[in-house]
Amino acid sequence: MKLVIRVFAVLAAIALAVSASHAQTLTGAQAQKSPQADVFLAFEKALNWQGIDAAGAYATPEKLAEMRVQIKQLGADSFKQMQAEMRKATPQGEARRKQIEKVVVDGDNAVLTLREGPNVATVARLAKTKDGWKVGK
């Protein structure tokens, strides 16, 4: 009887480990309306229209620190120019949401893919934190 219980316990542990590590792929409307999509779109909008401080609410501390270093290297004027260009080039609202092709969720990490053209895709990495999903490195 003890052997049967041990075998069952081992099989249950294996089943839990396999299901816990299995990535889930969301596509279409499911990806576009996902919490990861909501965070990415809010991050992008805040960054392009308000700046890094506003975008920081949707980013991990590591991503925010990385962005601050990049902006310091670019210079404030170059960053403002990049913002203006992104506002012109990036569709807004539902048009941008519809570009979200898929979200692959693997535990506390996710990868969001936007299709911006036949040969152009943007990939964003997200991490689940104690405060919810955030754009990460």
Image (spheres, helix red, strand yellow):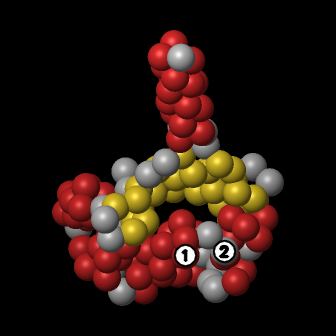
What is the x, y in percent for residue 2? 48, 16
96 or 102: which is nearer to us?
Answer: 102
Residue drawn at (41%, 82%) of the image: 46
Relative height, residue 20 to residue 115 (above, below): above
SS at mark 2 in the image: loop
Q: What amino acid type should be assigned to the residue bearing mark 2?
A: Lys
Residue 132 percent coordinates (x, y): 39, 69
Q: Mark 1 points at which residue?
A: 38
Is any atom of residue 74 visible in this view? no
Q: Is mark 1 on a helix, strand or loop?
A: helix
State left or right for residue 127 relative to residue 29: left
Q: How far apart are marks 2 and 1 (CA)?
A: 7 Å
What residue appears at the point 53 percent right and 81 percent down from the top-left corner?
A: 87
Left or right of 123: which side holds 127?
Answer: left
Visible residue check, residue 6: yes
* For marks 2 and 1 on the same chain, the one whose residue lies earlier in the sequence: 2
Residue at 75% across / 59% down in the picture?
27
Tell me if label 2 and label 1 are in contact, CB under 8 Å: yes
Residue that label 2 marks: 33
- Identify the image quadrant of residue 58: bottom left
Position of residue 89 relative to residue 60, above or below, is below
Q: Is residue 75 above or below residue 10?
A: below
Side of 74 relative to 33 (left or right): left
Left or right: 18, with 42 as reference point: right
Residue ranking furthest to the top: 3
Whole-percent x, y for residue 131 in the image:
33, 70
Q: Which of 43 and 75 is in front in this view?
A: 43
Neighbourhood count class around disc 2 (C-alpha, 10 Å): few under 14, some 14–19, many 20 upward:
some
Three-letter amino acid code of the residue under disc 1:
Asp
